[in-house]
Amino acid sequence: MAEARVLMAGDHADVRADGLGLVDGDTWLGIAWLDWWLLSNTETVEVEIAVAAPFRRRGVATQLLDAVIERARADGRRVLSGFDLGGDPVTGNSAGTAFAAARGFVRKHSELHQVLELPVPDEQLAKFDQPVDGYELVQWREHAPAEWLDEFAVLLTGMEDDVPSGDRTVESTQWTPELIRAAEARRLAQGRFTYTTAAVHTASGELAAYTQMGGTPETPDRLNQYDTFVRPNHRGRGLGIAVKAPNLRSLQTRLTRPTPLHTWNAPENAPMIAVNDKLGFRPVAQRTLWELEL
């Protein structure tokens, strides 16, 4: 609730979030959550539709989608985009993908959903505590240190440029120190927490890699692996696992009970999936991204 309230009630430079509900009296049948991007992807609306189980296959999602399409066209948007989150781990198929295909959406991208049960035993993490020659690790929590802001903006932009996106209609955000600080402030207002570990190339002084993990106290039974990115000119040295393992150790210090850590990667991102496999992640589902041209 805290996350949704901040997103929907606040003014943000990069996104406007709102939604629709289909109700019968006091009964909510289904909802549509909409993200309207303001800096990049300004022709796209991201939509998530959910229907309460007792009311499925009664046309609720169709009514919501029709209303979303009308609003998107009125705003001059050209593309509706949305993930199906619960697809089969191999095929990606689900009731949601069947609905999307029937309404004219086209499958554009897929991502493997993997889960790691925390805490990871110290002896397992110790296997990856191998310093990489020529690099030093830095860690921070909710705010990137001021001396690393410009470099961190380069890495965040590189992550968006580099992450596999299939055939989806997407523009990468050009991150700036101001956008980073705004994102941090929003995250704190939502009650979320983040752990970051980055690798510094000692010879050049540039940030070569980073990873971020976190969650929210409102859902202590769920943590998320956010980004992991290694600059292309620093790849092949084991920096991905070199930043992820210590970040996991830091994240685990706040655990009071076993908790799953979730992550998603495109199947073609084999190097990152291999890193996750080494750490003990297991596949649980495949999410697929679908688009509708308006």
Image: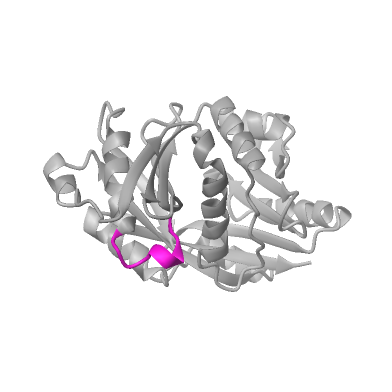
Decide which of 234, 61 is in the foreground and name it: 234
Span colored in magenta: 229-238
Name the residue located 19 percent from the left edge and 52 percent from the top edge. 130
Image location of residue 279, percent across then percent down: 24, 53
Image location of residue 163, percent across then percent down: 51, 63
Name the residue located 72 percent from the left edge and 29 percent from the top edge. 9
For the view shown, which residue lies furthest in the front direction? 203
Decide which of 151, 288 is in the foreground and name it: 151
Name the residue located 46 percent from the left edge and 27 percent from the top edge. 218
Q: Is residue 68 visible?
A: yes
Q: Quadrant of the C terminus?
A: bottom right
- Is residue 22 within the magenta segment? no
Looking at the image, residue 287 sits to the left or right of residue 274; the answer is right
Q: Quadrant of the N terminus?
A: top right
Decide which of 43, 34 is in the foreground and name it: 43
- Is residue 236 within the magenta segment? yes
Q: Quadrant of residue 253?
A: top left
